[in-house]
Image (tube, grey):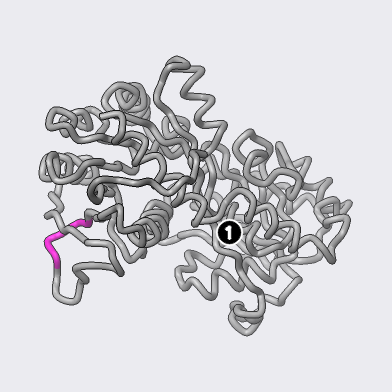
Amino acid sequence: MQPTDSPSLPRPLRVGILGTQGIPAKYGGFETFAEELATRWAEDENFEITVVCPGPRRPGQPESLGRVRLEYVPEPQAGPFTNVAFDLRCLWAHRRSFDILYMLGFGAAFACGLPRIWGTKVWINMDGLEWKRSKWGRLTRTYVRLMERVSTWSATRLIADAEAIRSYFLDTYGQGLACTFIPYGANPLDPASYPAELLPQGVEAGKYHLVVARLEPENQVKEIIEGYLRASAPHPLVVVGGIQNPNAYVQRLLTLASDRVRFLGGVYDKPRLAALRCHARSYFHGHTVGGTNPSLLEAISAGQPIIAHDNPFNREVAGGLATFFSGPEDIQSILDSEQYLPARAETHRAECLAWLEARYTWEGVTDSYRALAAQDMRRT
């Protein structure tokens, strides 16, 4: 992460955050990230922060969120290309509006060089290794891999949310690449604020294992269920993830539903989801292609035991707080031996919170962005 010295600037720097479905966050990880970052960043009078949202603005939609200005750009209807088309429109509409444009995602990387013609700095948040996602067909995967490469020259700077992602980009595209590591943050969850009464009917505190994920192959949901079913674990596995309009993969998962494996569908009520995390006997995290995954940070903030897929991203984020698996056989062994239970249960939550405080606070993340923005503008 960058130094956190408070910048001294001759005038407020104008920063625009693009690539989301808008804030307040109601959709996904990028939206939550944009809200958490922008509202804190804007507290510093050296900066003017704008989040660009899909428009046109409708009655009841706010013009601002705290000190953050919300700018609405009409969203084109272009079928599967709607997100890319929207990013293109935003890039063009705001090519001269800001000192720094921060694009979350690189689907429109081929156009991110346009604002640079007018002297605008362009940052791109690279998220995870998107081309590895099995949900993409061959053509889409080829396009995503191409945009990853294009982003290395179309942007002024790339932002990696994990050191492992930054290392990948430097190893793949050259050590001279302007690529900076700044992670996501997390807010500690206090179990007392999310009582067991918020749990779904039939789910008992401390007597269930939990998975919260998009039901996609790269999140190892099938492997987690298979490993759990092999074990003699007496407590049910609760799976949280969207099951409406199921694709072939989700349909296969649903055939495994039973008294032992319960599919709750998507849980979008934040207090109820927080209660599920806080009162789980263990939390499974199977993500394989992301960087600093917000759901893993949220699991750590809940202070419960974590069983995570063994890859560089999860080891970086969870460190010694998790037990790691590579396949169903490992999960069976971990559950049957109760290897996932922390050696010092009475101090485990405190260790989780100390880990987050040292590495993943939103305040620290925001300070790093402020310092990076000031640093990049001084180089102009």
Q: Residue at x 68, y 52 (%)?
A: 355
- Residue 162: image x %, image y %? 53, 38
Above or below for 63 versus 130: below
Q: Secondary structure at mark 1?
A: helix
Q: Which quarter of the image is occupied by the C terminus?
A: top left
Total count of labels: 1
Looking at the rendering, which quadrant does residue 110 occupy? top left
**In front of the other: 112 or 4:** 4
Residue 305 figure quarter: bottom right
Left or right: where 262 falls relative to 175: right
> Seen in the image, is 15 located left or right of residue 41?
left
Relative depth, front residue between 221 and 303: 303
> As displayed, is residue 285 above or below residue 181?
below
Residue 14 lies in the magenta-colored region = no
How far across and how far down the image is residue 221, in percent?
59, 48
Q: Position of residue 378 (x, y in %)?
A: 30, 33
Q: Which residue is mark 1?
A: 298
Q: Which residues are magenta?
A: 53-57
Q: Is residue 25 above or below residue 138?
A: below
Residue at 63% of width from left, 56% of height from top?
357
